[in-house]
Amino acid sequence: AFEPEPANRERLYRSLELNHIRNVKVVPKAVSHQPGTASLFPNGPLTSLGYERAGNRGGIEVECVRLDDQLPPGIKVSLIKMDIEGSEWRALASMPRILSACGHVITEFDPVALKASGGDPVEFLGAFKAAGFIIHHIESGEQIDPDEFASRYAALSSREKSNLLWNLHCERI
């Protein structure tokens, strides 16, 4: 598990301890498309990497790593879970090798936060399709086609766009 935010990392350690989980290594770094450092803006569940959101406290510098650089070739990753408040596109771009062999990705999808962090919602969905995944909205079970989403999203009002927050299951076909 990669968790750069100190308070969230402490909650993760506590959860692992309470649930007697011993096979998880917690890495105090952010996963991003390029190694280096970035500003992390702590705000509990609305913590953001590389951009400020309403209510964020002052930023802290954190180390960023590419997931493909952290896990050696040959390590099988069956499931990836991402909830990075808009920086999911950064993490996705950091793992082409790992993604090519992974069967499932669970991810939060918040187009407004993706755009605020420098990502593109349609490109994010399209990257899963290009990598051989089908995308399902977890709550409804609806299959999401990135090409259809682009036109549906463009037709939404600003208010509707700001309320769009989905949990997605991307499954290799």
Image (spheres, rainbow, N blue to C red):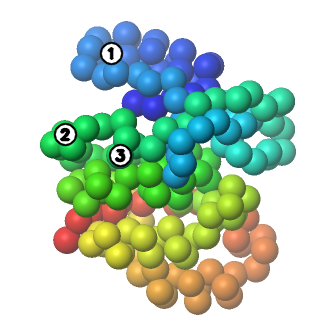
Q: Is residue 8 left or right of residue 103?
A: right
The tag earlier along the polypeptide, 1 or 2, is 1
Of marks 1 and 3, which one's residue comes earlier in the chain? Answer: 1
Q: Residue at x 32, y 15 (%)?
A: 19
For the question of whether residue 79 can be seen, the reply is yes
Query: Which label belongs to residue 19?
Result: 1
Which of the 4 quarters of the picture holds residue 136?
bottom left
Location of mark 2 (residue): 75
**Which quadrant: the C terminus?**
bottom left
Q: Residue at x 79, y 45 (%)?
A: 52
Going by the image, does 101 lie left or right of 48?
left
Give the image quarter of residue 26.
top left
Pointer 2 or 3: first along the chain: 3
On screen, 94 above or below 70? below
Which residue is painted at 20% across and 56% down in the image?
A: 101
**Residue 37 in the image: above or below residue 103:** above
Task: Single out the mark in the foreground, 1 or 2.
Answer: 2
Residue under label 3: 68
Q: Position of residue 9 (x, y in %)?
A: 53, 21
Kind of residue indicated by mark 2:
Ile
Tell me the quarter of the picture where residue 116 sits.
bottom right
Element type where label 3 sits in the image: helix
Q: How many marks?
A: 3
Between the residue at mark 1 and the residue at mark 3, the CA separation in whole angstroms equals: 29 Å
Q: Is residue 68 left or right of residue 39?
A: left
**Is the residue 8 above or below the residue 108 in the image?**
above
Q: Within 10 Å of the Cα at label 1, are there few (<14), some (14-19), or many (20+) other Cα atoms?
A: few
